[in-house]
Amino acid sequence: MRVVIGLFVALEVAFIISTYRQWLRLRHIRGPPFAGLSTWLWAVAHSLSGQMPTQLQQVNNKYGSIARIGPNMLVTSDWKLWKHITHISSRYNKSEWFAGLRLSPTRDNVVSMIDKEEHARLRDIMDRGYSKSMLNELESKIDDHINSLLNLIESSYQRPNLPFDFARTAMLFTLDAISDVTFSSPFGFLKSNSDCFRLMETIEEQVPKITVLTNFPRFYNILKRPLPSWLVPSPKDKAGMGAFMGVAEKVVAERYGPEQKDIRDILGSFITNGLTQEEAQSEILVQILASSDSTATAIRAIVLLVATNPPVLRHLLKEIDDAVNTLCGSFISYKDTQNLEYLCAVVREGLRLWPPSTGLVPREVPPEGDEWNGVRLPGGANIGWNIWGALRDRDLWGHDADEFRPGRWLEYNTEKLKEMQAMAELVFGNGNHVCLGRTLALMTIHKTIFELFDQFTFVVVNPDQPWESKGYGMFLQKNFWIRAYNRPPRPPRRQASEH
Ligand code: HEM
């Protein structure tokens, strides 16, 4: 018994000494009380709240643009520091936090990969799948799914005039559109108007757990060992993540099998450029998960912000109506959207006010340490990014930083505008990890917003609480009830052959 008590006391003492040492290393950086003593006291508690973006904003507002939120974790809302950290030639690397973004415990993907060389290899191959020429070819697929989205709203909700949950409908749309451009087999979410194999339900269940686990990267090293089969999703599952993996496995096997199919899409490009079958299987899942929620969040937020702001809505509709008179084709092209300055300002402002991807994505300070504006950053410390706070910072954006005001993008001189753009483009990350799907996402958002507002007037059913929105690095949103009314009929758009 004495031996057990002795061992227990020794462990406690060792724990207290190591906690004290950890605390000492970053004690010069202020943060919420006790956050520096244990990951549980601030980081885990707040990960679970679903309010992480606004809580990080409060932390940086209160304790300064570099603050401490864990024993070894800092957070910054200083966009210039984040640009420095993520610069292409920076010595900072991704921290172990990213291990939490593995889809399979034993396999890394381009998002979770920490090893710099291996990441560069994967990225080099995958980048070509998102080339401008490839996206031009795939644009008509986005049009097909915009068409299905408009038809679904028209036939199921507009004619019987039923309120519908646009949070769900937007996600059905992005899942179909992105699976089609990725591997030419849309899941059929819009057609069946349902959550095929309960994928959305699974995402909603899993995301809060993943957010908590990213606080404990060492846990993933345990998971790297083979696990009992009942603990990990299997492609043979009938529903959830396993069933989704099953679809990816089947689609990829067809492309690598004896009767290889050579198809022009993102997966086709991955294969041509040398991704192995196993890598392709894992990467197409990541593409779809990384993209469908973020793109859907952007579309939902912009619909909400425009529908509830009459002057902005009027201005946007005027631009849309003028454009429709001169456009040619059933759907606006991405190229033509880029000539509509107010639409572009609406999208920019929507992404600024509601950045869809708010993960901490911490980087590790290089071993020699660093210094920023007189603050010492010791080697090995992790520093995360508070994009929500940066994009609503009043010192940078003015007293109306919290307001949706697309006009701000049209009224400044070139120098100020350049600075605003440099800040706002961080919505898609920076440097060697800048979002691979940036152009695809922007194409989908601009085109969809144009076509939705061209066809419908949207009324938000519960303006005092328009939606349930929880931020876990990505947003889980539901119960965004709206009604859609047809806008007055106009002459059909000219078709290409009429030129
Ligand atoms: C509005 C929509 C989107 C937003 C806001 C967004 C945001 C981001 C951000 C901030 C990062 C960088 C994270 C970091 O610093 O480590 C990132 C990376 C990434 N994104 Fe996106 N994304 C969007 C849509 C998409 C789409 C449509 C795809 C693909 C189809 C995609 C695929 C990826 C991939 C693969 C990475 C990892 C890049 C790397 O680490 O090298 N994203 N995204």
Image: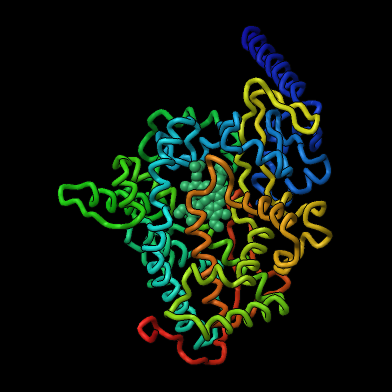
Which residue lies at the image location 49% right of the left edge and 31% below the top edge? 116
Q: Is residue 275 left or right of residue 373?
A: left
Q: Is residue 291 visible?
A: no
Residue 166 occupies quadrant:
bottom right
Q: Is residue 285 visible?
A: yes
Picture layout, residue 498 above or below residue 188: below
Viewer-nearest residue: 489 or 423: 423
Query: Residue 162 at what x, y percent from top left?
Result: 54, 83
Viewer-nearest residue: 104 or 84: 84
Picture layout, residue 273 above or below residue 475: above
Query: Residue 140 at what x, y percent from top left?
Result: 38, 69
Residue 343 occupies quadrant:
bottom right
Q: Is residue 325 left or right of residue 258?
A: right
Which residue lies at the image location 73% right of the left edge and 46% below the top edge? 56
Query: Residue 202 at what x, y percent from top left?
Result: 47, 54
Tag count: 0
Residue 356 occupies quadrant:
bottom right
